[in-house]
Image (cartoon, rainbow, N blue to C red):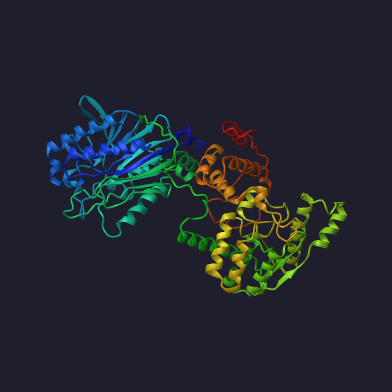
Amino acid sequence: MVFSDRTLRDFSLLRLAVVAPEHQVADVDFNLERMRECVAALADDGCRLLVFPELCLTAYTCGDLFFQPLLLTRAQEALFELAKLTSDGLCLVVGLPVAQGGRLFNCAAVLAGGTIQGIVPKTYLPNSAEFYDERWFSSAREVTSDTLSWRGQTIPFGSDLLFRCRQMPDCLLGVEICEDAWVAEPPSGRQALRGATVLVNLSASPETLGKESYRRDLVRMQSARCLAAYAYASAGAGESSTDLVFSGHGLIAENGIMLAESERFCFDSRWAIADVDIERLVNERQRNNTFADGQMTVGRIIDIDLADTPVDTLRRPISERPFVPSDAGDRNRRCQEIFALQTTGLARRLRHTGSKTVVIGLSGGLDSTLALLVAVKAFDRLGLDRSGVRAVTMPGFGTTRRTRGNAEALADGLGLTLQTISIDAAVSGHFQDIGHPPDRHDLVYENAQARERTQILMDIANQTGGLVIGTGDLSELALGWCTYNADHMSMYGVNCGVPKTLVRYLVEWCAEEEFTGAVATTLHDICATPVSPELLPPDAAGDICQKTEEQVGPYLLHDFFLYHVVRLQHDPDKVLFLALIAFEDRFEVGEILHWLENFYKRFFSQQFKRSCLPDGPKVGSVALSPRGDWRMPSDASSALWLGQIAALRQTLGLGG
């Protein structure tokens, strides 16, 4: 691997595990041995934080055996034995019953550096239905001292404890126990406001019908609400089944995304592992001013040492298409939602202006096709006659038979009258006016065609009292792959929030779900056509010779860069690291770095085009409107980012 000499900490990543060890009720020695085995296996796998279930040293279902001093004493002894396993930079969070001040508490002990660093008692004790926690335990609110004295060691004790990694200070650990997460105001919320980026929950959650999905949603949404990683470890099937069944459901979520989940209903030990991105969480919080407005509380912070993990592979999903869900069902729902956003945005603008006409330049390519489909559906929703959708195809020097034929077939299938206006003569006359040789296929040659087309569309809109619908997409705006005051300009840009990799899926979805027959057939062929502005003459066979991705790079890569640079605020070093994992079998490191450099150069230099964008709907978490998500000076320097890329190139031996 290219980054084999790097560690997860270099990229602000922490590998953690939630564990459901094989266990037996009240058999502390058996439970201790199984936990030892889990620690050994997970440490070998690079895990540095291991979270075990609620009361895992004794089991949760001991009932009145919790009043037996022998059980409590042996659990305490076992905890000291487990602490010895952490001397090499591990951190274990372990559940056990703890006696203090004449009361018994259901606790989570944090072990690191070979010692017990602190003990957190459970705050909320369920005492209804199948739960009887108050029969045995007291709440953290009834603690009489903020320390414990065990074996001559003074141990911090209380629900106000957080644990900070010395080697990665932004990695701050907060602990809550089972029911704490199910109440209206969980302790983890207050812990997050104090800076905790990793929240762990030691649980013994029995299974009942439908509870699995509810629990999953609870964990996922708490991670989103707290802008944190949330690791949930629940007791396994070894618990008593007198009245209940436990499954060992382990979950790890990060800012609303489920990273890992364990197998349920197993009697042997099971776990789930994930690499959580601490930097991403900190970046999210810095962007979110309402999070910063939350009421802070005070408490104690204990520093602990965590060992690093060499980079071997990454234990978190890294999608090569971050804007496109991998699950077909999720993807269809996403497409339906985006299409609804686009059509509603346009319909609202038409209602406001009173316009009953829209004008669209139809090239036979993906973007203009999607814009046309949006316009047609918007007209249908408003009960307007489709004759108000004025599709105009403007063949020029680079137009091919395939794209022109698809434009004609699409308009015909949708019941539209397609107006054809050749731009050859107008552009040739313009070349003569400005003294530009018509055989010089440079930027002037290309942009003159784009501007002539926009002028035609604007003038037709004036003739008909209509709106020119912009067709450019989010990826083109990021790269500045649009001609200033040409396809860059419109009266409403319906595609401005949709990245190129998603445009294709949207058109395919329209072919499958919204349209049938000849229209669907045409849409499938449009999706199979290479992306091109068609501003240079076709090849000898009459096919497209100017392919966009050969000039600016693969949109697959650029959309990946766009997401990780703009949405997640990662620097080039981390973007390259993640890209190498996502595209391991598709692109070489030199190719990725080349196009990443190109992305940064274009993204910075082309901001002036984004500073004066037409209106258009935001549809996802990445948007570049100067009135919305993205505010950037047009003359910002890219030197800092390009400097890191140059250093990477040198380090990797890829030349200057």
Q: How many labels does the image show?
A: 0
Q: Would you identify the image quadrant in which residue 152 lies?
A: top left
The residue lying toward the viewer, choosing from 417 and 404, is: 404
Report the residue at 28% width, 41% height from top. 52
Q: x, y (%) of residue 614? A: 66, 55
For residue 73, say whether it is visible. Answer: yes
Q: Please determine whether, in this image, residue 43 is positioned above or below residue 179.
A: above
Q: In this view, does 549 lie to the left or right of 282?
A: right
Q: Would you identify the image quadrant in which residue 245 lies?
A: bottom left
Q: Please determine whether, in this image, residue 288 is positioned above or below residue 341.
A: above
Report the residue at 57% width, 31% height from top. 651
The residue lying toward the viewer, choosing from 321 and 230, is: 321
Q: Please determine whether, in this image, residue 120 is positioned above or below residue 559.
A: above
For this orientation, the residue located farthest to the front is 541
Q: In this view, does 654 lie to the left or right of 434?
A: left
Q: x, y (%) of residue 647? A: 59, 32
For this orientation, the residue located farthest to the top is 152
For residue 361, say whether it is visible. Answer: no
The quadrant the C terminus occupies is top right
Q: In this view, does 347 lie to the left or right of 75?
A: right
Q: x, y (%) of residue 197? A: 41, 40
